[in-house]
Amino acid sequence: MGVIRAEPARVSDWAANSVGAAWRAFDLQLTVYAGLLVAIGLVMAYTNSVEDGSVPLEAGTTFSRGLMWAAIAVVVFIISTAFDYRWLKTLAWPIYAFQLGLLVLTLAIGSGVGSSSRWVSIGPLTFQFSEIAKILMIIVLSAYLASRQGRLDSLFSLVGACVLVGPPLALVMLQPDLGTSLVFAGILAGMLWMSGASIRWLLIIAGGVVAMIPIAWTYLLHDYQKARLEAFFNATPDIQGAGFQLHQAQIAVGAGGLVGKGLTNGTQTQGQLLPVQATDFVFATLAEELGFIGGIVLFVLFLLLLWRVLTAGWRSRDAFGTLFAAGVASMILFQLVVNVGMVLGIMPITGIPLPFVTHGGASLVSMAAGLGILQSINIRQTRAAW
Amino acid sequence: MSNFLDDRPMPVRSLSRFLSFVLIIVIAVSGLTARLFYLQVVDGGRLATLASRNQTALEPIVSPRGLIYDRNGRALVTNVATFVVKLRPSELPLSQRPVVVERLAALLRMPAADINSTIDGNPGSNFDLVRIAADVNESTARLISEAGADLPGVEVAVEARRQYTDGPLMSQVLGYTGPVSGDQLRRLKADGYLPDDLLGKSGLEAQYETQLRGIYGSQSIEQDASGRKTQVLQAIRQAQPGDSLTLTIDTTQQRYAQTAMLWAMKTVGIKRGVVIVMNPQTGEILALVSLPTYDNNQFARGISNADYAKLLNNPDKPLLNHASQAHYPPGSTYKLVAGSGVLADGKITSKTKVATKGYLTLGSTRFYDWNHRGFGACDIYCGFGHSSDTFFFQMAGKLGIDRLGYWAKQYGFGQPTGIDLPGEVSGIVPTNQWKQDALGSKIFPGETYQAGIGQGYDVVTPIQLINAYAALANGGTLYQPQIVRDIVGPDGKVVRPFQPKVIRKLAVPASVLKTMRNAARSTVTLRHTYNLVDLPIKVAGKSGTAEFGLKDSKGRLPFHSWFVGFVPKDVRHGSFDGNDSQLVVLAFAYDSRTKGNVATEIVKYYLQMHFGIQHDYRLPNLLKRGNFYQSN
């Protein structure tokens, strides 16, 4: 008793432990649930490729690209797990600078549909830096809030967090990518909540945000964004124009019924009826082909995953780990609700991917990094549990 | 055993915040689940139906309409690609309609009222396309198709339209196609006609609609739930192109006939006329001109309401084919009937002489000969040749009205000839029964006299009259006049070859017909029809001057001028004893305004062109001198 107490953990401590001990702390469930979600995403990419009439394994199909990104994600996950997360606290400010740099770079050299710039090409890969920026934001916020431990219910901490999120959010907004900037806001809200920020001040700020909506509508939103929102709130949607995707997606979901039409049998999602079915509307394909049962399986996997993420945070002995887990959970939940809600017609259309499932390299890689860091937190906390 | 890290500051961990976070997750995912359940299980049936409707629909494939050629293979109509503007009323909100119609009207340069009446007259439902304008030029079509949201419900399509090679020259024969009307659609829907379909509206286009149209195919297309075509999946049944028609009409002869008629119209001031050229041995129509005419290309391009109203309101009725769709008193040309009748019934022989006078008296009424001095004792050659009215009053009297009617019907009067053009009228052959039915009394003797010379109740169509003389010329066979020679399938094979159709063999003995042919020749040799005397070819025929309407201020009745003539096979040396004629020509000049027998001049001019006679035998001064309105 007490022989080895008193010393905070250091890198060398972990290095001294056996790999087996680390493995016991490693959360296998978390990895399995995420892996299953990625597998579902790949199956959807496969079925979409088949319906496109292409050979799924040929280069350039949704499926083959999905496979490639999954492989990259595995590598990123392993590296992140091995990396001692505590260094992230130390590196928080450089990371913040790096994040802003990525977003400025996207604005400068990015390409996108029309005048937007969201994607950056690196060699053969196109990358959406804003996806990476989300996970970097969680790191920075976790480090900041952890450093304010003990004063977290003060207004200053709260405002400080908002000020930190402000520049990246604005840069994403400029791309323009309304969806991702909302994810930033969602992450911030979740993390503040878990940090124990004063409920009174949180409510006041939320009220302020609501009050800002008319101003944002007039000055910040682009016409297409307004059209999408109007289509969503319109009682009789304009099914020819802006409401077209929404309408088609709901028909696709409804056509799936209880058990779905079977993989690759989605008629609605075939051809051009449902735009961007491979990416943001992937849930429509899933719902049509795998039905209500398939949808429930997906939801249960997300619930379990979120539970494991929050558990990792709960078990963390330092505030950074807890807050980081809260950030990742907020991000996953927010994206799940907005993406699926959009397909189901209860959320406006925004270009937010469904975590793990949506084919889209940056999203998957940043999720892999997030989970890797969580595992890193897991295996560096529970030494004393045995 | 205590945790070796226990002395580290406990991190920010609030159980309440943690549990409330978990609660939010559960509520959010439950909400998604509930919505998914509603969409897929509760509302799934309806949406599945929508999705399947989304999926495929059958769409007709329009078959290429058959073409029409003249007897020498000259294309009289072709199909050309054209932009058509259509509108689906259900997609045009009522509140926006005035604005959209205004905008369309400006783009299409047509009156907004026309567009409105077209939409309101839409034969189909509000969900069916209405044809607004055809033959829209490419830049306008592009503008409209790009206007999209500004012109809701408006679509631009590429369709084939009819291009009539000779326009007005053939309009009366070919007719035109036009949008299907509500009544027609109800009738034809079962045959696969579409609400925005075109069909033959007049002339051969209407008469041979079934053959020309072909059979529409069908293809399955992929549509979204709002009816937009996203792609063609497959053809279920290929469209079968329509059959083509080869006409008996010869464009050159048609042009000669029109030239002759137009010349007379210009020289005399006639407004309306008909020229028909026919082969009496087969019933083939070589030329059929009815003036005034119109340009059927106007209809093919989509005629404006104003232009259509102009055609409808023209007193000379350009849309009517006066050769078969209108009847007129035949005048002296009708003496063929009485002449053949009395000879065939043995009331007289070819040698019988009858006294002709200035007039006959019946009760207190005098029936004047056109020649108020009469012609003395006359046989049939003299009576027919001089066109003596008193001669034929007596012949009609000998026959009686019913027997006269019998012979008229033998020659095909009083019934449609069956020519393959729509809307043929039957004319009137007065008999006791007819007058009883029509007017409620018996024929008076004076009316019988009038009937004998083609006045009074008698009315005939030009096609009936030429057909009667064709039967005379060919030795007694009444053929059904035909305007379509062959019907040719899309593969070039003849589907229906030409076959002369006999209506009847006349009950008139061959010897009587020979007498009547020579009597018809005597109109020239006796110099009655002096217009033809100098012509180096032998023509037999009969002129007619048929009074109609009301007397003018000077007590004169306006009259039509007729001439129907035929030539022997050997036009210079042949004889009318034979029945080998290959050519019958009829001219009819409505309200002819001249005593110079303009119809004969028209036939003469046509024959000059037909036989390539270099010397011009026309007598324009005669026509001018005798002008009913200009001189005196």
Image (cartoon, coloured by chain):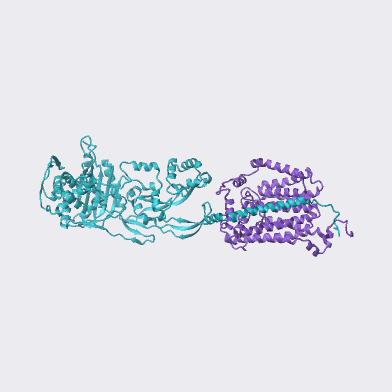
Q: Tally the marks.
A: 0
- In depth, the one of B15 and B518 nearer the eye is B15
- The structure residue drawn at horizontal position 61% and vertical position 51%, both measured from the top left corner, is A345
Most distant residue in the top direction: B553
What is the letter of the purple chain? Answer: A
Q: Left of B517 or right of it: where is B177?
A: right
Instruction: Locate residue B307: give its quadrant.
Output: top left
Residue B271 placement (x, y as % from top left): 28, 42
Q: Colour of chain B?
A: cyan
Q: Is residue B131 above or below residue B48?
A: above
Could you tell me which quadrant the C terminus of chain B lies in? top left
- In depth, the one of A5 and B278 nearer the eye is A5
Could you tell me which quadrant the N terminus of chain B lies in? bottom right
Q: Left of B490 or right of it: where is A3?
A: right
Task: Tell me, yes or no, if residue B613 can be seen here.
Answer: no
Task: Tell me, yes or no, if residue B33 can be seen here.
Answer: yes
Q: Left of B561 or right of it: where is B299?
A: right
- In depth, the one of A357 and B138 nearer the eye is A357
Residue B460 placement (x, y as % from top left): 24, 48
Residue A341 placement (x, y as % from top left): 64, 51
Residue B6 placement (x, y as % from top left): 85, 55
Most distant residue in the front direction: B42
